[in-house]
Image (cartoon, rainbow, N blue to C red):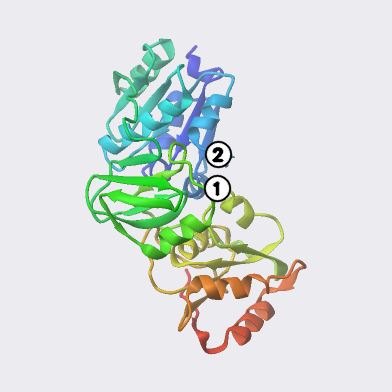
């Protein structure tokens, strides 16, 4: 019997591997006993795929360290190079035991910091992928500095879920000082995003979640599910790892989100779940994810005030008790007045 059929876990990262069908193919070919998914957009794509997945609000390296059974990382980078870069980062964070990394973008089974064993050879045989070895290299940067590799010029660059600018080359270098995160190389800064990140608290450059490019390329599959007419309202002003869990909680009738990118992600997830969004934006979206809206969604485009400042005012209006979503929206629109242009986006 294949060792994969007994107790091996497939740890999956990113939406692309589901949207391309690679995850379904790996599941059918390798028959792992469990699929554990890390990532916000990956969860939406995973649920749409219909595969039997479990979901973790932690990075893949932490998932793999906590597993007490054989496991491998499955990923599809935007390019073979970016896929290998991602695998190397995960392997470095896992530690000395190394990882088996199945990279669909390059068609490789990469054994990072470990010799190919029976499990790696079995995966390579069943998938037809090349079996190769990889050794993680030290970051080689000064303390407090982080290099974000595998960027494409023009892509949005994220740190801990906040877009801080646009890549101008294939590497972006940032430094963390007493003033917060500062650009060093390869970044056209988005000042508002950088300020927002630095206000969120101390950043550890060694462990921060850094990436470039869209977090999902495919539109969500809208659902026929309808939220309760009355329920709780969730307020989101950042894209943390608990975002999906907050939005998908039982009894939620709507989401209030602040910021163009945060609203885009909330709308994407909301369309998938059938939950409407009241988004407070100022029109500086970075196109990080295709946006669709659930019925009942409303967008408030701030005028004469920043979306952050307007969001702070709205935050104190979020009730702890259950409300009627339509009544709540009417109250918000009246309180905001002429400080925002109100529109109802089309929905599918």
Q: Mark 2 points at which residue?
A: 58
Instruction: State whether residue 145 is above or below residue 140.
Output: below
Q: Is 323 on the left or on the right of 260, as rendered?
A: right
Determine the image quadrant of residue 296: bottom right
Front-lying residue, 132 or 281 = 281
Q: What is the spatial separation of the Cα atoms under label 2 and label 1, in whole angstroms?
A: 7 Å
Q: Could you say whether the residue bearing mark 1 is in a helix, strand or loop? A: loop
Front-lying residue, 258 or 206 = 206
Please state the horizontal and vertical placement of residue 132, each as a whole percent of the image: 29, 19
Front-lying residue, 283 or 35 = 283
Discs 2, 1 touching: Cβ within 8 Å: yes
Instruction: State whether residue 6 is above or below residue 25.
Output: above
Q: Name the residue under label 1.
A: 241
Q: Residue 57 carries which label?
A: none
Residue 297 visible? The answer is no
Q: Which residue is drawn at 30% across and 22% down?
A: 128
Identify the residue at the far front of this view.
178
Q: Which residue is drawn at 57% across and 24% down?
A: 67
Instruction: State whether residue 270 is above or below residue 99.
Output: below
Instruction: State whether residue 16 is above or below residue 232.
Output: above
Residue 39 visible? The answer is yes
Determine the image quadrant of residue 290: bottom left
Q: Is 262 on the left or on the right of 320, as rendered?
A: left
Please state the horizontal and vertical placement of residue 307, each as a whole percent of the image: 49, 73
Q: Residue at x 22, y 49 (%)?
A: 169
Q: Could you say whether the residue bearing mark 2 is in a helix, strand or loop? A: loop
Crowding at label 1, few (<14), some or many (≥20) Cα neighbours within 10 Å? some
């Amino acid at each position: 019997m294949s060792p994969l059929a007994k107790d091996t876990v497939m740890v999956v990262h990113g939406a692309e591997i589901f949207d391309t069908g690679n995850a379904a193919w790996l599941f059918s070919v390798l028959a792992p006993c469990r699929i554990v998914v890390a990532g916000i957009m990956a969860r939406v794509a995973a649920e749409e795929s219909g595969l039997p997945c479990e979901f973790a609000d932690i990075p893949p390296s932490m998932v793999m360290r906590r597993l007490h059974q054989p496991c491998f990382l499955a990923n599809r980078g935007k390019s073979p190079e970016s896929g290998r870069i991602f695998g190397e980062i995960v392997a470095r964070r896992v530690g000395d035991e190394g990882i088996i990394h199945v990279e669909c973008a390059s068609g490789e089974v990469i054994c990072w910091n470990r010799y190919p064993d029976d499990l790696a050879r079995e995966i390579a045989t069943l998938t037809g992928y090349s079996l190769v070895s990889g050794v993680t290299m030290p970051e080689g940067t000064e303390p407090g500095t982080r290099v974000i590799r595998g960027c494409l010029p023009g892509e949005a660059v994220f740190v801990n879920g906040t877009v801080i600018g646009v890549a101008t080359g294939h590497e972006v270098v940032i430094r963390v000082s007493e003033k917060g995160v500062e650009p060093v190389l390869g970044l056209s800064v988005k000042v508002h995003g950088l300020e927002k990140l630095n206000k969120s608290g101390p950043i550890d450059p060694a462990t921060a979640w850094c990436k470039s490019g869209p977090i999902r390329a495919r539109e969500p599959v809208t659902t026929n599910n309808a939220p309760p007419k009355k329920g709780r309202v969730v307020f989101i002003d950042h894209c943390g790892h608990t975002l999906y869990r907050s939005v998908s909680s039982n009894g939620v009738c709507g989401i209030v989100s602040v910021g163009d990118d945060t609203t885009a992600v909330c709308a994407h997830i909301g369309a998938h779940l059938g939950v409407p969004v009241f988004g407070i934006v100022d029109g500086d979206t970075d196109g990080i994810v295709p946006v669709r809206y659930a019925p009942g969604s409303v967008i408030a485009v701030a005028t004469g005030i920043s979306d952050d400042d307007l969001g702070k005012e709205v935050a104190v209006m979020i009730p702890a008790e259950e409300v009627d979503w339509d009544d709540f929206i009417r109250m918000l629109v009246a309180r905001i007045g002429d400080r925002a242009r109100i529109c109802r986006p089309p929905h599918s």
